[in-house]
Image: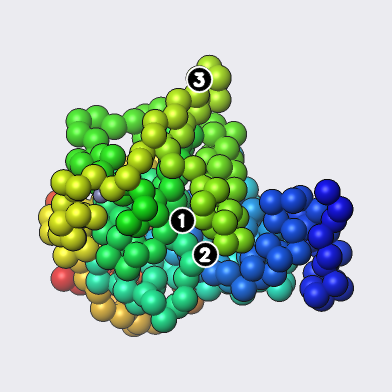
Amino acid sequence: MPPEDASHLAPDLTDRYSRQILFPGIGADGQRHLASAHAAIIGTGATGAATAALLARAGVGTLTLIDRDYVEPSNLQRQILFDEADAQACLPKAEAARRHIALFNSSVTVHAAIADLIPANIGELLGAEKRIDVYLDCTDNFETRYLLNDYAVQQGKPWIYAAAVGAYAATMNILPTETACLACVFPKPPSGPVETCDTAGILSTAVNLAASLQVTEALKLLTRQPHLMRRSLLSFDLWTGDRSEIKTGKPDPDCPVCAGRIFTHLAGEGRPHITLCGRNSVQIHEHHRPVSFAEMRSRLEQHPDIEDLRSNDLLLRFRRGPYTVTLFPDGRALIQGTTDIAQARTLYARFIGS
Ligand SMILES: [Zn+2]
């Protein structure tokens, strides 16, 4: 097949993306569609950093990155967009990713949101006026995935599930009205002990495979070829070489979400506090109100048992005994050193306010 005519692309872009344009599945038209596309990446940790990097390299014009966490040394084994300076500065992941993408593809517009995706802010972050073409799940928890599923089905917007733990990677495309949704396939979140990065560890190769599968599906969609997208839950174990593929088919006529349009997660019912993956910590996000770091600093400096108090524009951090408290400008906090919610709440109330 002769290479597609790329003369309607700007010359510098034709050169930058020449190898991708040569690939028949993309071509010059596909490349043009990518330049005008907007993908939102929810979670910019391991999978999200790889997904963001691949989409930015491929020339997807606009990316929205949403992440609640900051970079730590233990992330560097697998979170390919970050470096030691980011960990040293405790830079929020969404902002660190934005800065790194700007270094290798300055033509991509990146919106970084340092936030936990919750029912109260999902409309603002992912709403119709943002003109987002696809939502990419790079989270580490089912709570956020069910919230995203509710919102995507309500808005009729495609989203792509991705998961990685141990040596295992899995993805699934959800195209509302065409395919099963997350709740059709998994009516309830997994119960009982679930393997996480904390208990099973994680290989960076599993993360990168999950990201590669997810991004390839996104490229089909963003080049306006949704009919080529897989209709299955595909999973691999990279260590054993086992592969499994389960057809996901049509929406389940009994699904409360896509058939009943009952969006319990979007309504915020039963949202617990979250224990983060990969860390002995609790997130407190019940206090949504702006915090003045300057005021907070001068107050905390009075406490004799507070150590290592540091702040920049994006976060404030201190140690108190075995606990490290990280506070974000919207009042959200991560309490490290405990998985006890009552203990975390007590620390928050005592040092930040109730
Ligand atoms: Zn469904």
Q: Which mark is residue 136?
A: 1
Q: What residue sits 49% from the left and 42% below the top?
A: 230
Closest to the observer: 267 or 81? 267
Mark 3 to mark 2: distance in Å? 30 Å
Q: Which residue is mark 3?
A: 242
Of the image marks 1 and 2, the number of the one nearer the N terminus: 2
Q: Which mark is residue 257?
A: none
Above or below, comparing residue 111 to residue 341 in the picture = below
Mark 1 to mark 3: distance in Å? 25 Å
Q: Residues within 10 Å of mark 2 (few under 14, many from 20)?
A: many
Dot 3 falls on a residue whose secondary structure is loop
Whether residue 2 is visible here, answered yes or no, is yes
The location of residue 186, given as percent across then percent down, is 26, 39
Assess whether mark 2 and mark 1 are in contact (beta carbons under 8 angstroms). Answer: yes
Q: Which mark is residue 39?
A: 2
Of the image marks 1 and 3, the number of the one nearer the N terminus: 1
Q: Give the image's coloring scheme.
A: rainbow
